[in-house]
Image: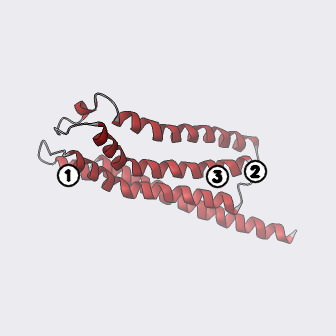
Amino acid sequence: MCSQILRLASRLRTLVWLGIAMLIVMPSLAWFDPDLASRWPQSDFEWTWKNRLAAWALSAPPTLAVAIGLGQLLRFCGRVREQRAFTEAAATALRRFGWAIIVGACILPASRLGLWLYVGAVPTAAGTWTRFLFGQTLLAASIGLTIGLALLVFAALLREATRIAEENASFV
């Protein structure tokens, strides 16, 4: 395998570790920020530590699904670094990554809605709920579904390429 691919896989692995750390640390820092109430002006919710923990738990599932998926991307990068990209293990890791992204995208709207209902966020103007349900959340979920499905296609292609490579190797 060419050295450029190995270098890219190594760099990707580094960025994936950074991404996993950020997905775990940044939301936690946001929910336990002392100035959290100012970011929720439409709610007179009492931000006790118990309520902050509950809000974090409501918002965490999509993020954790993606973090778990990134763990599968680490496995894929490991196969590439071992020069075993055309193996069933590499295709499986890529497929699992795709499914994790899809799961995160599918549970994102419910997670956000549950959070808004928990904190008692009320619409401040006409259409606030519509913007929430069909705005950024729907956009993020749609992009996640698209990327997840693309990863499933790439995993299927990799699985087929692996099968063909094994078949060709058996002729030699």
Please name the residue that numbered disc 3 is placed on. 76
Residue sitting nearer the eye, 170 or 94: 94
Amino acid type at circle 1 is: Thr
Question: What residue is rendered at 61% in x and 41% in y?
Answer: 12
Q: Earlier in the sequence, mark 3 or mark 2?
A: 3
Give the SS element for disc 2: loop
Q: Which residue is mark 1?
A: 130
State whether residue 99 is above or below residue 28: below
Q: Position of residue 136 (x, y in %)?
A: 31, 46
Q: Is residue 62 left or right of residue 14?
A: left
Which residue is disc 2 drawn over? 83
Alpha carbon distance from label 3 to label 1:
39 Å
Q: Amino acid at mark 3?
A: Phe
The kind of residue on which mark 2 rests is Gln
Q: Is the C terminus in the top left, top right, bottom left or bottom right quadrant?
A: bottom right
Which of the pair 81/55 is nearer the observer? 55
